[in-house]
Amino acid sequence: MTGAPRQERTGAPRGGGANGPLRVAVVGGGPGGLYTAVLLKRLDPAREITVFERNAPDVTFGFGVVLSDETLGGIEHADPVVHEALQRDFVRWDDIDIVHRGTRHTSGGHGFAALGRHRLLHILQERCRSLGVALRFRTEAPDPARLKETYDLVVAADGVHSAARAAHADVFRPRLTQHRCRYIWLAADFAFDAFRFEIAETEHGVMQLHGYPFAADASTVIVEMREEVWRAAGFAELDEQGSVERCAKIFADALGGRTLRSNNSAWTTFRTVVNERWSHGNLVLLGDAAHTAHFSIGSGTKLAVEDALALAACLDEQPTLAEALTAYEDERRPVVASTQRAARASLEWFENLDLYLGQRPRQFAFNLLTRSRRVTHGNLRLRDARFTDAVERDFGCPPGTPPMFTPFRLRGLTLRNRVVVSPMDMYSAVDGVPGDFHLVHLGARALGGAGLVMTEMVCVSPEGRITPGCAGLWTGRQTEAWRRITDFVHRQAPGAAIGVQLGHSGRKGSTKVMWEGIDEPLPEGNWPLVAASPLPHRPGGQIPREVTRAQLTDIREQFATSAWRAARAGFDLLELHCAHGYLLSGFLSPLTNHRTDAYGGSLDERLRFPLEVFDAVRAVWPEERPMTVRLSATDWAEGGTTAEEAVAIARAFAAHGADAVDVSTGQVVAEERPEFGRSYQTPFADRIRNAVGVPVIAVGAISSWDDVNSLILAGRTDLCALARPHLYDPHWTLHAAAEQGYEGPAAVWPAPYRAGSRRPRTGRTDAPKPRLTLRS
């Protein structure tokens, strides 16, 4: 009974293995909760397991559930009975259809499996009953505190609005983010023959349909649109049936004129749930109570089922309950974080769908398919080479040429490929003069095949250095030293371009070199700092002086003089560094610019000085040579630069003649909280490129040539800048060409290196195995 005292095994810890928790309460009778109950009962039939579900057994929201082959494999291993029942009801298909402006493109080889949500619940309920799990439908779960006292383990699988999580919010510390689109779950009484995405451009704005079959005669249909479009279209005033009829009319072509039906369907906005902790004592979160991932990359049911598998395994493997719950979270958190990053990218792609409407239909389809960055150019080619080849032809790739090895023109400079060696501070100059280290460092990467090699931030004055080891361009001696390097690149690596990045440290100057303590003040020999406002970069750091009007003029002239020297030094491209919290970036961010004069306040005023510097540099920089600007598109901190402001900043620089925008993020304030992950900064470049129409350079954890190909072919960037991969492998670009079987003008091996253009053999491991048996 609910109020009975716990029964614990004598001398046994309430943990895992055969000594696992004896009495278990599961709050929530959805797939995650039911499957947890199944697994825990199978592993120990002596367990007393009760599932509390407030609704009737046949009540559910939504229609179909999609599960991956990976998840099904886990189910098959853990409980063949459930797997066999699922197999009998699954519908399977391989194709994705994307319909855009009347053109349908199909990509195959994807492999989906789905079934009705009602059927899934019925299978899991029957399995629970057969194992002896107590199912209490139409029953509100007792208070979480009471459950924790009464049961050995409480599994909170009660969804996005979890009462158990809310009761201990101070421990779990949930963060709920509400997003910009409204959506509604509906169904159609026929089966789509593919996963279908259809775009409708209406007088009120763009809307999209996500549809897939879940039975031989039924499909899930999700209709989604931005909040402002939803309101403009009048959905806020319609009742449930009115919304259903209106959606069927808008997407009549996709539905073949058929009707839609609902199931207590309501328009809602998606919420991303993230918790700092997943367990509290003997209470553990599972499924949507712990985390959510947008439906556009798959089902929340998939994550919940995978949670159940991991939780049951950890309880079976670990000696104590505390260790089991820690192991469960350690195992699942990285997987969930990765899924949530992909889901966030997919969600935001659909939120900003109007940015891509002008793309050619086939490129639009490729962009949609790769939106989460989990499906890439490479694995899409494995799934459907014919489709990928067609996208490449539309893009203009010559036969046998990967997208990354197509040329790109900026003003009078044609880059042989789309790879950029990102600016990386080396802190190895003496009195601002680059030496042999810089020659070898930059020369090696130019020989390594990149289309453009960028210097580190080259400082415009001694006071503008970050560290004593920073390189500069304020003297003739420095100019000649740089000329030695550009001459080497142009002579020994023909086809490679070399660019210079000019900057001023601002409040982030007078610090130790990186490996001695990044951003830490020098113990002695400090120089005075200036910044937009007198704010230290870090607590206890040096406080800069607010730069005066006279100093602004001097600094502007320093930039112009350094640009003139850069032209004499033979650089092919110049980039103005307005990112990462250095001087010009400090003017742009509202977190670091608190001025009350004409150079602070509104965005236009914060832009004033960086644009003045840009104009002064552009005036002396040769007309035929391109000039770019690097921006931090977000500060990753509350109250910082918004996405809309980043677009406006890029648009302003483009209007002043920037040939491309190098889109980075962060490093502006010490209290930033970046959302790190694979190619995590590229969505900011994507947005600027497609909103402003200016070429962009994407940066940030782009580590594979597959990523480069994917981003370029999808139209999210024009160039990709890579830093750490080029530290690991100076010949990264040439090796990318070799690994893709490309031998062409965009990746030419230097004559002395040509013998190494094929991967070396690795001994006898690739030789034919000896014959040890004879055929009888």
Image (cartoon, grey):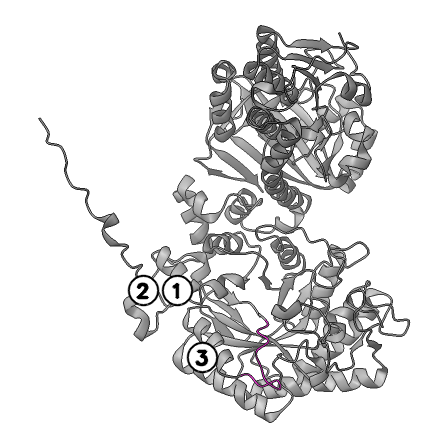
Residue nearest the observer in this picture, 185 or 25: 25
Q: Earlier in the sequence, mark 3 or mark 2?
A: 3
- Would you say the residues marked 1 and 2 are in contact, meaning their CB atoms lie under 8 Å apart? yes
Q: Amino acid at mark 2?
A: Ser
- Foreground residue, 178 or 20? 20
- Where is mark 2, residue-wise? 757
Task: Report helix, strand or loop for mark 3.
Answer: helix
**From where the camera sits, is residue 189 visible?**
no
Residue 489 numbered tag: 3
> Which amino acid, mark 1?
Leu
Q: Position of residue 610 (x, y in %)?
A: 75, 74
The residue tagged 1 is: 734
* Magenta residues, start to end: 425-434
Helix, strand or loop at mark 1: helix
- Mark 2: secondary structure: loop
Question: Is the residue 663 above or below the residue 231 in the image?
Answer: below
Judging depth in this view, the residue of 588 and 469 nearest the camera is 469
Specify the quadrant that holds the C terminus: top left
Name the residue: 72% across, 53% down: 673
Q: Is residue 551 magenta?
A: no
* Picture coordinates of residue 412, whole percent (x, y): 52, 77
